[in-house]
Amino acid sequence: MKAVFSFWQEFKAEQATESLKKMLPSYVKVIRNGHQQKILARELVSGDLIYLEGGDYMPHRGCVHVQHRAIVQPAPELRRHF
């Protein structure tokens, strides 16, 4: 019985947390007019460059253009010892 109560309590806590997240304003880092700034996601306009870092969420109004800067280095020589 204790396990059922613990599960129910944790389930309700997760629901409450998700509800609170939906009520909080969502911010996004953008580069606008050459300057990086933090704005509300609902204020995004066409032409804003969204600045993403590891762990950031992609706003639903954005699209992704990936630019890779590859640094190519020669692979170290591998030797097998039998």
Image: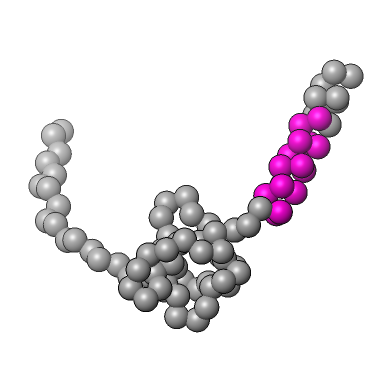
Find out whether residue 10 is within the magenta segment. yes
Rendered residue at 70%/54% (across/down): 22
Rendered residue at 14%/57% (across/down): 73
Query: Most extreme residue toward the top, as rendered?
Result: 2
Look at the image and give the residue range highlighted in magenta: 9-23
Q: With 26 as the anchor, is 2 left or right in this view? A: right
Query: Most extreme residue toward the right, as rendered?
Result: 1
Where the N terminus falls, by quadrant?
top right
**Helix, strand or loop: magenta stretch:** helix
Where the C terminus falls, by quadrant?
top left
The reply to whether residue 39 is visible in this rendering is: yes
Q: Position of residue 62 (x, y in %)?
A: 53, 72
- Asked where in the image residue 11 lies, by quadrant, the reply is top right
Q: With 19 as the anchor, is 52 left or right in this view? A: left
Find out whether residue 18 is within the magenta segment. yes
- Asked where in the image residue 7 lies, by quadrant, the reply is top right
The reply to whether residue 58 is visible in this rendering is: no
Rendered residue at 12%/41% (across/down): 79
Query: Is the residue 47 above or below the residue 37 in the image?
Result: below
Q: Position of residue 65 (x, y in %)?
A: 41, 73
